């Protein structure tokens, strides 16, 4: 397994907006049976984010009949692990696969929000328009920024030399980590199930 670099996984995944699955890939050479027990690994330099993410994702996998273990229950230390330490933890857990999620990019979208039309503009005669004009006033167009996180989730099967599956999502940033992870995990789990991996 290649070296894992610790980065912020999800300072927040989407808590209220739907997470968009933008891309998936499956190794065409992989045709084994679905995995039986997966270790869930969240790459994050924030311990609370990592734990909440792993716990929630593992719960959702178990709800779909997949045995799952959050990595922090086997590897409680924070920060980047030596590869040998990670391999030992996976063996200790009895997992036959490892699911790793990392943040790839943070994106910002700007959206113009037009101002409401002044009330006076709806009046037909000059006198009613004049009266209505006192009720409305011009407001400039405002711009709202929306922040998104692009994350990559990759599935490794221990009996296979290389990654067998990967999915990329684009998710609105939020501070509700649990709700965000639930929203994020739904399309991810559905895609892995569709591809016969879980």
Image: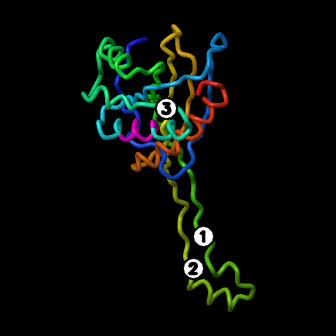
* Residue 132 horizontal/vertical position (percent): 62, 86
* Residue 181 horizontal/vertical position (percent): 46, 42
Which numbered disc, 3 or 2, marks the residue that appears first in the sequence? 2
Q: Which residues are magenta?
A: 52-58
- Contact (CB < 8 A) between labels 1 and 2? yes
Front one among 47 and 171: 47
Which numbered disc, 3 or 1, marks the residue that appears first in the sequence? 1
34 left or right of 5 in image: right
* Residue 69 horizontal/vertical position (percent): 41, 31
Q: Residue at x 50, y 28 (%)?
A: 152
State the residue position of label 1: 116
Mark 3 vs mark 2, CA separation in Å: 45 Å
* Residue 187 horizontal/vertical position (percent): 59, 38
State the residue position of label 3: 151
- Contact (CB < 8 A) between labels 3 and 2? no
Front one among 4 and 73: 73
Q: Quadrant of residue 120?
A: bottom right
Q: For label 3, count other residues whose C-alpha is less than 10 Å away and answer few (under 14), some (14-19) or many (20+).
A: many
Secondary structure of the residue carrying numbered label 2: loop
Mark 3 vs mark 1, CA separation in Å: 37 Å
Q: Residue at x 36, y 28 (%)?
A: 71
The tag on residue 136 is 2
Of labels 3 and 1, the one closer to you? 3
Q: Is residue 142 above or below residue 55?
A: below
Mark 1 vs mark 2, CA separation in Å: 9 Å
Secondary structure of the residue carrying numbered label 3: strand
């Amino acid at each position: 397994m290649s070296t894992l670099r610790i980065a912020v996984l999800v300072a927040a995944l989407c808590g209220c907006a739907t997470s968009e699955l933008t891309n998936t890939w499956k190794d065409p050479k992989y045709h084994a049976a679905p995995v039986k027990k997966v270790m869930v690994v969240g790459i994050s330099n924030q311990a609370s984010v990592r734990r909440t993410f792993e716990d929630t994702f593992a719960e959702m996998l178990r709800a779909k009949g997949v045995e799952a273990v959050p990595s922090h229950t086997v590897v409680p230390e924070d920060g980047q692990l030596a590869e040998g330490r990670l391999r030992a933890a996976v063996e200790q857990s009895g997992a036959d696969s490892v699911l790793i999620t990392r943040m790839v990019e943070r994106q910002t979208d700007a959206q113009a929000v037009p101002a409401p039309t002044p009330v006076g503009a709806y009046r037909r005669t000059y006198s009613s328009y004049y009266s209505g004009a006192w009720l409305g006033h011009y407001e400039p167009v405002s711009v709202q920024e929306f922040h998104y996180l692009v994350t990559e989730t990759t599935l490794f099967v221990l009996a296979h030399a290389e990654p067998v599956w990967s999915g990329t999502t684009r998710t609105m940033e939020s501070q509700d980590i649990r709700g965000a992870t639930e929203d994020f995990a739904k399309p991810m789990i559905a895609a892995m199930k569709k591809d016969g991996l879980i």
